[in-house]
């Protein structure tokens, strides 16, 4: 480089450059122009600066390709997504903190309230103990409008003790003196205590006249000479109601006691005709579905090992609950293909376990058949169970989303074996989409509402099931 | 390094709201992905060009340009139309580039080692001036040689001078806009550009004193 220019040169250069850049005000511009006109050296300097500047036009520009645009936008999108996730995580933390604060405040308030009530109010546990027999039978009592209806039911013989599988009388310690009841409650396990508390909450949530009615019903029942038989009727009637569709229950609730008994009678006759009188009751049906779930869980790994590698991989990509449903569906199909003789991988131990969970009468019915026919009967019960409100959903436990539950049911019961195999051969997401598509195409509802024939009424168009 | 957020009066906000790019940026502020894509498409070439001549490497320039767009997007919610959009964008670019250059010098990398190797490679200016052009067709050599010499002369400037020159030459910014972009006074821009142009003149003087193609002329004479 040259020697440092003098301050005067620097100042002149600044003015010349600013002149070239059009950054001088009119006065300074005129001054530079006069200087240029009078001094050839300044002219040469200006020319030299301008030439140099113009040479910069040779510098190349840098056009960018589509790939650059695309990656820039993708980066931005990813960053935006990260931000949203971070915000959500922070919001979730804030909510958790707020919830903890609320819980802490609530606990503090509850403690204060507890001590205040303990000092000022009567023992709330005493109320629980007094209502204990009602709470223990809350669901059953709520189905009984009054003693008149109960006696009519008893007289009809529909749910009488002769037909009972086991004595349903109240054998718990919920009766007797308050101190005996207290001992009984204290002897309960944590889950039983929690259940009792929930019932108490539900009871407390009823209108006062309803609460009073239930207490009165219990007292009348206690005094009734046929108390034990009536309790059995209540219990069996409650079980039967559990299996009734909600529309059926609504219909029943609108009737007078005598008409209601007639309605129940007709309904039972129809059911017995349809099922050959062999349909298991609510408790049995629940036990059967629970057993099926256990059976599927127990043999899931072995069953998966029998599937082709591709299917296994697809199933491995699913959530455990979805995979469980899919596996059960496959097992069920294989069982059906084998004419419902013996379920895949089932052992005598499986059948034994089922028998021990059944009521004595149902067990007798099952054991009366030759072994190969026993499995056929179990399959019939299961098919019935899957149509019920407590069907596959009750069997597999709650699902995170209702849509998944419906799709899983559809996969299990609404597809042919070939369709199912084809779906299992697809990648996870594609399989879900295809399953959804078939579901919407078929629009076959599960569970209630059902027609007595089990088929849609002629002329009616199937409607896509709504969220339950 | 944060993004400069300018507090502006209503009148200047109205004035700059007439800038179509400012309007686009306001749409980006309202989470319009299409507007952001449009801004990227409009500015990516200009931004990469300036950054490439500033940092000397095409690859690093593209990385920096993406970082700049990312910063624009992240700071969209705090954007206020206080100046031309390009001024705001190149302020972010200037900060990002200076940071990158500082990091590079901290890692003791050679000042401008990684510029793209054109047909001339990364040779110093005097070497180019002395190089024989006998192995290449005359016209092509003249063009590439000129470009290489100009590029090397630009690289001989310090970072701030280089940025001021690039904003003035490629973006056609006024002194006031360069001052805002580089966060210095207009007077500082004036002396920065003056020194830069004087330095360029000194480096390039021997080149254009021999006419348009000094080496070529010399080479032809030898032949």
Image (cartoon, rainbow, N blue to C red):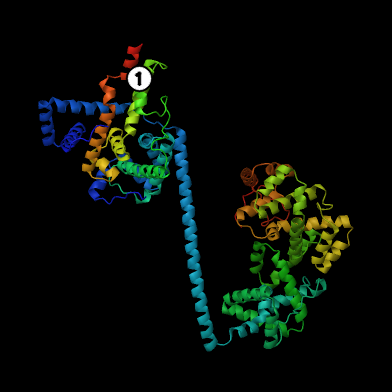
- Residue A150, position as x, y percentages in the image: 72, 76
Residue at image location 26% in from the left, 27% down from the top = A52
Furthest-top residue in this view: B223
Q: Is residue B99 visible?
A: yes
With respect to residue B196, does B134 lie above or below? above
Report which residue position mark 1 lands on: B142
Furthest-front residue in this view: A3
Residue A51 is left or right of residue A318, and the answer is left
- Foreground: A384 or A401? A401
Q: Is residue A217 visible?
A: no
Chain hosting mark 1: B
Q: Quadrant of residue B87?
A: top left
Residue B4 is left or right of residue A10, and the answer is right
Give the secondary structure at mark 1.
helix
- Foreground: A122 or B146? B146
- Foreground: A103 or A264? A103
Give the mark count.
1
With respect to residue A306, does A56 lie above or below? above
* Quadrant placement of the N terminus of chain A: top left
- Residue B201, position as x, y percentages in the image: 25, 29
With respect to residue A63, does A411 lie above or below? below
- Foreground: A334 or A3? A3
- Residue A5, position as x, y percentages in the image: 20, 35
* Quadrant placement of the C terminus of chain A: bottom right
Residue B187 is left or right of residue A324, and the answer is left
With respect to residue A33, does A228 lie above or below? below
Q: Quadrant of residue B171?
A: top left
Decide: few, some or many residues near mark 1? Use Cα within 10 Å; few <14, some 14-19, many ≥20.
some
Residue at image location 43% in from the left, 44% down from the top = B107
């Amino acid at each position: 480089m040259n020697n440092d220019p003098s301050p005067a040169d620097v100042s002149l250069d600044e003015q010349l450059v600013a002149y070239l850049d059009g950054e001088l005000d009119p006065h300074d511009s005129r001054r530079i122009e006069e200087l240029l006109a009078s001094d050839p050296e300044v002219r040469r300097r200006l020319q030299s600066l301008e030439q140099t500047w113009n040479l910069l036009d040779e510098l190349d520009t840098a056009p960018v390709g589509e790939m650059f645009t695309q990656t820039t936008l993708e980066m931005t999108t990813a960053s935006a997504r990260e931000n949203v996730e971070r915000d959500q995580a922070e919001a979730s933390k804030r909510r958790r903190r707020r919830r903890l604060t609320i819980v802490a405040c609530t606990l503090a308030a509850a403690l204060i309230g507890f001590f205040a009530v303990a000092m000022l109010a009567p023992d709330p546990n005493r109320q629980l103990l007094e209502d204990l027999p009602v709470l223990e039978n809350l669901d059953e009592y709520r189905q009984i409008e009054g003693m008149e209806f109960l006696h009519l039911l008893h007289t009809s013989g529909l749910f009488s003790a002769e037909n009972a599988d086991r004595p349903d009388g109240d054998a718990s310690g919920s009766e007797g003196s308050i101190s005996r009841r207290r001992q009984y409650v204290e002897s309960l396990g944590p889950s039983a205590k929690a259940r009792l508390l929930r019932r108490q909450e539900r009871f407390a949530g009823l209108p006062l006249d309803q609460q009073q009615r239930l207490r009165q019903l219990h007292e009348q029942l206690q005094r009734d000479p046929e108390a034990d038989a009536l309790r059995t009727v209540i219990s069996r009637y409650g079980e039967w109601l559990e299996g009734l569709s909600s529309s059926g229950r609504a219909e029943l609730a609108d009737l007078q006691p005598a008409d209601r008994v007639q309605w129940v009678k007709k309904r039972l006759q129809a059911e017995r005709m349809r099922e050959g009188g062999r349909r298991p009751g609510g408790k049995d049906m629940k036990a059967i579905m629970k057993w099926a779930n256990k059976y599927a869980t127990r043999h899931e790994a072995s069953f998966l090992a029998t599937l082709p590698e591709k299917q296994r991989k697809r199933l491995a990509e699913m959530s455990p609950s979805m995979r469980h449903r899919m596996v059960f569906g496959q097992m069920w199909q294989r069982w059906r293909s084998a004419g419902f003789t013996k379920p895949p991988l089932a052992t005598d131990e499986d059948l034994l376990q089922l028998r021990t969970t059944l009521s004595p009468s149902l067990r007798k019915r099952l054991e009366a058949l030759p072994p190969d026919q026993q499995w056929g009967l179990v399959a019939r019960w299961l098919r019935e169970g899957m149509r019920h409100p407590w069907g596959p959903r009750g069997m597999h436990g709650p699902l995170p989303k209702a849509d998944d539950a419906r799709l899983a049911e559809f996969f299990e019961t609404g597809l042919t074996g070939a369709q199912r195999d084809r779906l299992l051969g697809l990648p996870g997401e594609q399989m879900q989409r295809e399953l959804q598509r078939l579901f919407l195409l078929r629009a076959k509802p599960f569970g209630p509402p059902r027609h007595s024939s089990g088929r849609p009424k002629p002329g009616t168009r199937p409607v896509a099931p709504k969220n339950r | 390094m944060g993004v400069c957020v300018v507090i502006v009066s209503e009148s200047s906000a109205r004035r700059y709201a007439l800038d179509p790019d400012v309007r686009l940026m306001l749409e980006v502020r309202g989470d319009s992905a299409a507007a952001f894509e449009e801004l990227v498409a409009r500015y990516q070439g200009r931004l990469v060009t300036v950054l490439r001549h500033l940092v000397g490497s095409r690859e690093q320039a593209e990385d920096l340009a993406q970082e700049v767009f990312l910063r624009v997007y992240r700071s969209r919610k705090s954007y206020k139309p206080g100046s031309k959009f390009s001024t705001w964008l190149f302020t972010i670019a200037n900060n990002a580039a200076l940071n990158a250059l500082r990091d590079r010098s901290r890692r003791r990398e050679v000042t401008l080692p990684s510029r793209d190797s054109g047909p001339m490679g990364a040779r110093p200016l005097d070497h180019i001036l002395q190089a024989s052009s006998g192995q290449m067709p005359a016209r092509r050599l003249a063009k590439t040689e000129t470009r290489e010499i100009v590029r090397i002369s630009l690289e001989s400037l310090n970072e701030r001078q280089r940025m001021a020159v690039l904003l003035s030459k490629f973006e056609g910014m006024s002194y006031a806009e360069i001052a805002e972009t580089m966060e210095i006074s207009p007077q500082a821009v004036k002396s920065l550009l003056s020194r830069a142009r004087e330095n360029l003149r000194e480096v390039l003087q021997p080149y254009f004193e021999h006419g348009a193609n000094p080496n070529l002329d010399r080479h032809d004479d030898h032949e």
